[in-house]
Image: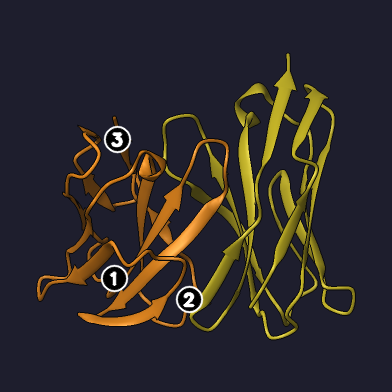
Chain colours: A orange, B yellow
Amino acid sequence: DSGVTQTPKHLITATGQRVTLRCSPRSGDLSVYWYQQSLDQGLQFLIQYYNGEERAKGNILERFSAQQFPDLHSELNLSSLELGDSALYFCASSPDPSGSYEQYFGPGTRLTVT
Amino acid sequence: GENVEQHPSTLSVQEGDSAVIKCTYSDSASNYFPWYKQELGKGPQLIIDIRSNVGEKKDQRIAVTLNKTAKHFSLHITETQPEDSAVYFCAASMPNDMRFGAGTRLTVKP
């Protein structure tokens, strides 16, 4: 158990809809990262927050957004969903903002868009 | 940006044999190289990492080597066991930019 929690575990929704994925980092970790993993694909970095502020952006679509709250939990919002958005979404946390440090991954949220 | 290539994409070994997975990276500014193991239905788990000021690191049956000049690093698993079967990802990181390899599916046959 990494100490990172993600909810929900599974999510099934229709095209055009909007969903919110939630992540709680390990106790004490200020950095949260979001990744997308499509079927048989590697991990694609989406976005990083550190202590409430956006720190780095990867291949995140404009339809996607995220935020980190004062209690350090983070939410990833996916809107106008398309079939191709079906994937596993992971968050990871780290005590360090630089990215050059261990990241601890949550169990993921499996999103299915029908 | 950084580009990480990982080989092979699949690897099958007999229990007790060694397994080697290789990765190359493109940006010499990368200074942190973690390896993750992902079992079916779970999130990636950090198994070992190495920083650019170190050439080799070992943890029981797992070792990682780094060649900065050639920009490649490798994961070595000795005395493989069936529970080592999983997908392994390498990554290369510089400040605010971590890139992952595409993964290697390792199967250890009993």
Q: Is residue A19 left or right of residue B18?
A: left
Mark 2 or mark 1, which is nearer the start of the sequence?
Answer: 1
Q: Amino acid at mark 2?
A: Gly
Q: Is residue A11 above or below residue A23?
A: above
- Picture disc at residue A99: 2
Quarter holding the C terminus of chain A? top left
Q: Amino acid at mark 3?
A: Val
| Residue A17 percent location from the top left of the image | 17, 44
Q: Chain of mark 3?
A: A
> To which residue does mark 3 refer?
A113
Q: Is residue B68 left or right of residue A77?
A: right
| Residue A7 percent location from the top left of the image | 19, 44
Q: A16 or A73, which is in the foreground?
A: A16
User: Which mark lies nearer to you, 1 or 2?
Assistant: 2
> To which residue does mark 1 refer?
A29
- SS class of the residue under badge 2? loop
Taking the spot 46% from the left edge, 66% from the top edge, the residue there is: A59
| Residue A26 percent location from the top left of the image | 27, 61
Q: Chain of mark 1?
A: A
Taking the spot 19% from the left edge, 40% from the top edge, the residue there is: A8
Q: Quadrant of residue B98?
A: bottom right
Separation (CA) of disc 2 from disc 3: 31 Å
Q: Is residue B104 above or below residue B84?
A: below
Mark 3 or mark 1, which is nearer the start of the sequence?
Answer: 1
Taking the spot 65% from the left edge, 45% from the top edge, the residue there is: B103
User: Which mark lies nearer to you, 1 or 3?
Assistant: 3
